[in-house]
Image: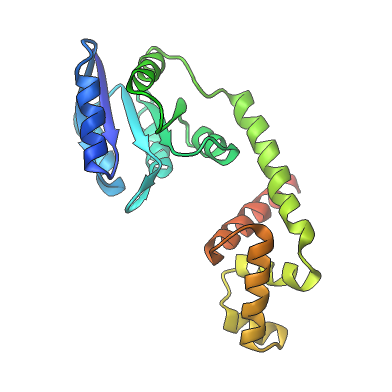
Amino acid sequence: MIRVFLLDDHEVVRRGVAASLELEPDIEVVGEAGEARHALAEVRKCSPDVAVLDVRLGDGSGIDVCRQITSEFESVKALILTSFDSDQAIVDAGLAGAAGFVLKQIRSNELIDAIRKVAAGRRLLDDAEVRMAMRRLRESEQGKLIDLTPQEQRIFNYIGDGMTNRQIAEEMYLAEKTVKNYVSNLLAKLGMSRRTEAAALAARLEERKRRDD
């Protein structure tokens, strides 16, 4: 019997997945959670073989939960549920120790098949795939900065340091409104809508630079 734990903040989705899994003679849903903060405690209680984790949660990320589970429970195989098949999803899942990830749009029989495979010890996400995705991601993210002017690049770096528009304006001797315009322009060039996305990109690029150095 394969013991499965489910983490999804949408109760209707979670119940639907659980109902599908319970129809299988070799699968038993032994625990559920709707919030990241409760997940680890529930996993400790139910001791699953496979943890099916939604990436986007109301109070956190399934990737962070995956990292906690795989570091504490060597025998639990984590299967990440994601809405997007992207290099970022591959890298995040791989670095968190996931045995694989599946798209939320797949049919229930495909999810069941994936659960059986990882429970049997198969990896649906191998190290070579993660390395290739990381290389593509590094190249594409670094390439996004090419179109930034030197002034925008400087402001981008300050955003990565966590500085507000007012702090950047004081540092660069500019009007706060001017900085705001620069931020809007650089976000548009980067294809982003939120300042936090630029800050996260800056942090990733800085971390990679330190590792390469």
Q: Position of residue 153 (x, y in %)?
A: 74, 67
Q: Quadrant of residue 45?
A: top left
- The residue at the point 70 percent across, 37 percent down is 135
- The residue at the point 69 percent across, 72 percent down is 155
Is residue 154 positioned above or below 1 on the image?
A: below
Q: Is residue 113 left or right of residue 137?
A: left
Q: Position of residue 62 (x, y in %)?
A: 38, 42
- The residue at the point 52 percent across, 39 percent down is 92
Is residue 147 positioned above or below 45 on the image?
A: below
Q: Is residue 31 left or right of residue 160?
A: left
Q: Position of residue 110 (x, y in %)?
A: 39, 19
Q: What's the colour scheme?
A: rainbow
Q: Position of residue 137 (x, y in %)?
A: 66, 42
Any part of residue 212 in sight: yes
Camera-nearest residue between 33 and 73: 33
Image quadrant holding the N terminus, namely: top left
Q: Is residue 175 left or right of residue 66?
A: right
- The residue at the point 68 percent across, 75 percent down is 182
Any part of residue 211 in sight: no
Q: Quadrant of residue 29?
A: top left
Camera-nearest residue between 176 and 48: 176
